[in-house]
Image (spheres, rainbow, N blue to C red):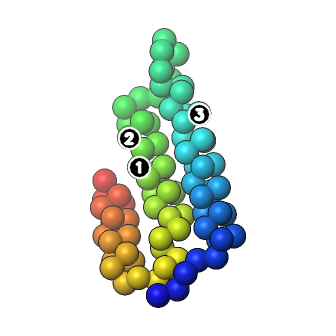
């Protein structure tokens, strides 16, 4: 099983942080009296955020067949949602 480098892991976690920060910014538009997102927009945001995070998980670099299989299964569930 391959082990990701420190730089690869760091870059993945930085990318996840950026994904989450951007999604939190978008989610902030939903709160309070200035709610400009519909329920469908919120659903799309949750799905897009989940898909983006899933694609950058550092554990995917381990090359473990079980992790790859679960990632594939979860990706398919998100695509169908």
Q: Secondary structure at mark 2?
A: helix
Position of 17 relative to 32 (above/below): below
Task: Give residue 39's position: percent from left, percent from top.
Answer: 37, 31
- Crowding near pointer 3: few (<14 within 10 Å), some, many (20+)? few
Closer to the camera, 36 or 28? 28
Task: Give residue 77's position: percent from left, percent from top.
Answer: 30, 61
Check contact, mark 2 vs mark 1: CB within 8 A: yes
Mark 3 → mark 1, Cα distance in angstroms: 15 Å
Residue located beneath label 1 in the image: 47
Point out the tag, 3 or 2, that comes first from the N-terminus: 3
- Crowding near pointer 1: few (<14 within 10 Å), some, many (20+)? some
- Crowding near pointer 2: few (<14 within 10 Å), some, many (20+)? few
Q: Secondary structure at mark 1?
A: helix
Residue located beneath label 2 in the image: 43
In this rendering, which labeled residue sits more in front, label 3 or label 1? 3
Q: Residue at the location (42% across, 36% down)?
A: 42
Q: Which mark is residue 25?
A: 3
Q: Residue at the location (51% across, 57% down)?
A: 52
Q: Residue furthest top?
A: 33
Looking at the image, how many numbered discs can be counted on the residues? 3
Query: Can you see residue 72?
Result: no
Q: Residue at the location (48% across, 49% down)?
A: 49
Task: Give residue 38's position: percent from left, percent from top.
Answer: 41, 29
Q: Residue furthest bottom?
A: 1
């Amino acid at each position: 099983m391959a082990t990701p480098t420190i730089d690869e892991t760091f870059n993945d976690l930085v990318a996840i942080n950026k994904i989450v920060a951007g999604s939190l910014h978008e989610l902030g538009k939903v709160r309070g009296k200035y709610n400009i997102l519909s329920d469908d927009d919120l659903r799309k945001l949750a799905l897009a955020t989940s898909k983006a995070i899933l694609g950058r998980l550092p554990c995917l670099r381990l090359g473990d067949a079980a992790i790859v299989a679960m990632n594939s299964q979860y990706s398919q569930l998100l695509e169908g949602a």
